[in-house]
Image (tube, rainbow, N blue to C red):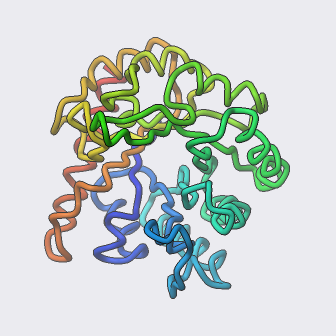
Amino acid sequence: MKISTEIQSAAKIIGEEKAVELIAKAGFDAWDFSLFSMCSYDWSTRSLRPSQHPLAGKNAIDFAKKLKKIGLDNGIVCNQSHAPFPSSCADIRSKFQLAIECTAEAGGNICVIHPDNNKNAQENAEMYCELLPFAKSCGVKIATENMWDWDNTKDQAAPAACSSPHSFLQHLNAVDDEYFVACLDIGHAEMKGLNTNAVEMILALSGKLQALHLHDNDLWHDSHQIPFSMRIDFEGIVRALKQIGYCGDFTLEADAYLGSYDKGTVFEGIKNLADAAKKLRDLYLQ
């Protein structure tokens, strides 16, 4: 059971190469390959912008191999990845095979690919089933994730694909393949308006749950903060994980946490994240 964290938030400050190195030095066992820079998405126009990032060019695979080597040189591995989103954008969906291939080249076993928030299980299954043969050839599982929309009138989250135990299980059953698994975003499950919680989701998903996105919030907004800093009951969540015999990794997605750090202080923030991840794992193992 490894402790891991996404690299995007650190990479914004120091670049992916240095981020992997410092994540290792901070005490993590693995790194979660954030592939969002593969596409620069403009949410206002709902279209892609030009990007000079290595992941957006012809050498994306070489960049993935480079990060893998940096990780191995520093004693850590890539455990999983996160494909670009939103999946509602056709130009982004066209990058999913490359995201899976980059995951494999980096050494990851799972690639998280968001469902289209507003499509049903059968509609999303078409996308996943198209990708599965390629994912299997790469030895990479695809994980779907619980999502949310926002109700401006009620000022709270609104249901979306996989946001409830019923919807999540519908998506998993619609594909019904051992290479298609669940990544539970703990923070999303605890948002006001979705009428569920992380413990309920964990118990419902059971053996299908093979990956996590761990972060904290105020039980209302998608805060993506460091665990144990806000209101989520992580002790109850860990008890539920133990109850189902969860044997995946503990991967943080507290990507808003490093926003207040700079190049000179970011390692301190990464160490704080590692300490939080270790605390979660220790709770599970005790």
Residue situated in front as seen by the camera: 286 or 213: 213
Q: Is residue 114 above or below residue 194?
A: below
Q: Is residue 210 above or below residue 204?
A: below
Q: Is residue 196 above or below residue 99?
A: above
Residue situated in front as seen by the camera: 160 or 227: 160
Q: Position of residue 6 (x, y in %)?
A: 41, 56
Which residue is found at the position 56% from the left and 32% from the top? Answer: 162
Residue situated in front as seen by the camera: 253 or 129: 129
Q: Quadrant of the C terminus?
A: top left
Residue 135 visible at all = yes
Residue situated in front as seen by the camera: 230 or 209: 230
Viewed as shown, does residue 122 lie left or right of 144?
right
Viewed as shown, does residue 64 lie left or right of 229?
right
Residue 105 visible at all = no
Q: Residue furthest front?
A: 153
Q: Is residue 186 above or below residue 7?
A: above
Which residue is found at the position 19% from the left and 58% from the top? Answer: 269
Q: Position of residue 204 (x, y in %)?
A: 54, 15
Viewed as shown, does residue 285 lie left or right of 228?
right
Q: How many marks?
A: 0
Which residue is found at the position 47% from the left and 31% from the top? Answer: 159
Q: Position of residue 189 (x, y in %)?
A: 40, 30
Q: Residue furthest top?
A: 243
Q: Position of residue 173 (x, y in %)?
A: 73, 24
Which residue is found at the position 33% from the left and 32% from the top? Answer: 191
